[in-house]
Amino acid sequence: MPNQSKYEADIASIRNMMERTTKFISLSGLSGVLAGLYALMGAGVVYFMVYFPQSPLSYRIETIQPFDTVMKFIGVALVVLVASIGTGLWLSSKKAQKAGLKIWSVSSKAMLINLAVPIVSGGIFILILLMNGHYGVVASACLVFYGLGLINASPNLYDEIRYLGYSEIIIGLVSAALPGYGLLFWSLGFGVLHIVYGLLMFRKYDR
Amino acid sequence: MSNPFSKLDKVLEHSVRLQVLSILVVNESYDFNSLKETLELSDGNLATHIKVLEKEKYILINKSFIGKKPNTRYRLSEKGKQAFKKHIDALEAIIKSQKQ
């Protein structure tokens, strides 16, 4: 048949256009792995600064901590956040460049807006929790709102991100029931899960 | 038996026009410059194809300004949506019949 390849190419180009204009396909899996490593390092720093002689697996009953301890937590968390976003931007723009795509596009804008709505609401909610001294559920709130953000942005990202979102929410809710394990669940959600999903995505899309 | 080739949409047999509609099927609206960048076309080339789609009433146009820069956005019309679906069904039928 003469025109067979033309029709198949048409179908392929339709799929390509639909995906390229809705999904931010330049997201680097490797940056997920690195973000996970930063989170684990951050959790390690906090553990040695605050809890050290205690076993990391022990359940903490004391919920009210001195304010300067809380500030240490926030400081480390912010460093982890900035390093993760920076690495994500850097590696994703490299990936975009390699594929001849632009990192700042209609789809990446849509993704950021969808991600920002739950994350910003969560961020404000967490600030209010901190101001009122409800430190116990902060780790849980971070995980739940982050998970909601990922699910909300997943139509503009790879499908795997939706499952990462569900996993973050589940870990966050379990963590809310066991506030004494906050740091442990935080490390699991932001550290281990990022590394696992990052590796998955790296193997599937980055090579 | 009906011939699936006869069901192909003549307007959409050109790949640029098919690609423009593909983008508008999954995006509520899309602007001229982003279309140009995504499809890697020149202004004139894209404008020619847009005009054809406009004449067929497959797309709706919304012209506005962002500051002093003109911003032209396109949306898929109901007619364009039907035409796209029919064309895809025809493509599918052709590929299926050729695979047998």
Image (spheres, coloured by chain):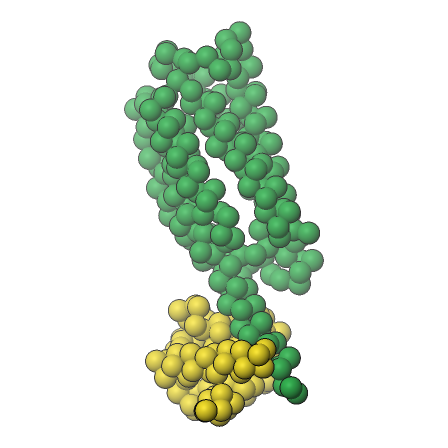
Chain colours: A green, B yellow
Residue A131, percent across and down?
A: 33, 26
Extreme-top residue of the structure? A53
In percent of the image, x 50 and y 67: which residue is there? A18
Residue B76: quadrant of the picture: bottom left
User: Quick one: quadrant of the N terminus of chain A?
Assistant: bottom right
Extreme-left residue of the structure? A132
Residue A16 appears left or right of A145: right
**Residue A80 appears in view:** no
Closer-to-camera residue (A84/A158):
A158
Residue A134, percent across and down?
A: 32, 23
Residue B39: quadrant of the picture: bottom right
In percent of the image, x 46 and y 79: which residue is there? B89
Q: Is residue B98 above or below residue A111?
A: below
Residue B41: quadrant of the picture: bottom right
In percent of the image, x 36 and y 84: which residue is there? B79
In percent of the image, x 52 and y 89: which residue is there? B5
Closer-to-camera residue (A94/A158):
A158
Closer-to-camera residue (B78/A119):
B78
Q: How many marks?
A: 0
Residue A3 appears left or right of B29: right
Residue A16, percent across and down?
A: 56, 68
Residue B12, percent across and down?
A: 51, 85
Closer-to-camera residue (A76/B29):
B29
Q: Is residue B57 above or below residue A147?
A: below
**Residue A60 appears in view:** yes
Residue B50 appears left or right of A116: right
